[in-house]
Image (cartoon, helix red, strand yellow):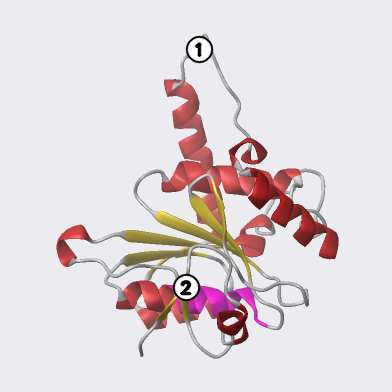
Amino acid sequence: MSCATQSAGRLTPHASARFAAQPACATPVYRRSQRKRVLLIDGYNVLRSGTYYTCGSSDHTDDFFNAAREQLINDVLQFAGHDYKATIVFDGAGNRFSDGAPLRIGGIDVVFSPAGVSADKVIERLAHCARESGAEVLVVSSDATVQDTAFGLGVDRMSARGFCVEVKRTSQENHVTECPHRTIKRTVASRIRPESLKALRELRDSL
């Protein structure tokens, strides 16, 4: 099955209308000598997997910039580093304004699935396209459907809890190697271009 290439910006109206019917593929074709690694995160599944991202609230859908979601994005940035092309997929199926267009934040893609399309389906399509392109794929989710799909596609899997353990370890390692005399805290908001920040606020207000 061939994969239609998705642009780095927002989907065109025609492409957005076809999203539910055809795989959206943001992964370029790689030569074997340039084999890349793709990281796909089931966003809400990770946030709700335990106590690591609770931050005093069990609801992570009301505001894009709540503390838990911002922490997840920062953790994925740290975990992915230069090793992975990372995408966090949040479920936007219930939001009629969601078009599935990726937002580039600090080097990773953040995607809300299009209206009427589950995050599971988006992850499946991205994983399939990445595998077709010759990339190694790691899917992070404890959702049984996502894990079964990953197994069927022959991609690597990591549970949501396992990911939380890994990012905690990575965070501790980074803390040890940081310069003790000067620490600069960079939040997700500080990494976002003004036009992307405006788009996120419009999405937040539409929920």
> In which quadrant of the rendered view does residue 122 lie?
bottom right
Element assignment for label 1? loop
Region rendered in magenta: 117-126
Amino acid found under the numbered disc labelled 1: Pro
Q: Which residue is mark 1?
A: 180
- Above/below status of 60 relative to 98: above
Left or right of 150 in this view: 131: left
Residue 131 at x, y percent in the picture: 33, 74
Mark positioned earlier in the residue sequence (1 or 2):
2
Q: Magenta stretch containing residue 132, yes or no?
A: no
Q: Residue at x 40, y 79 (%)?
A: 128
- Above/below status of 97 relative to 188: below
> In which quadrant of the rendered view does residue 81 lie?
top left
Left or right of 37 in this view: 177: right
Q: Which residue is mark 2?
A: 6
Q: Which mark is residue 167?
A: none
What quarter of the picture does the N terminus occupy? bottom left
Q: Magenta stretch containing residue 121, yes or no?
A: yes
Q: Residue at x 69, y 59 (%)?
A: 48
Residue 181 at x, y percent in the picture: 52, 8
Amino acid found under the numbered disc labelled 2: Gln
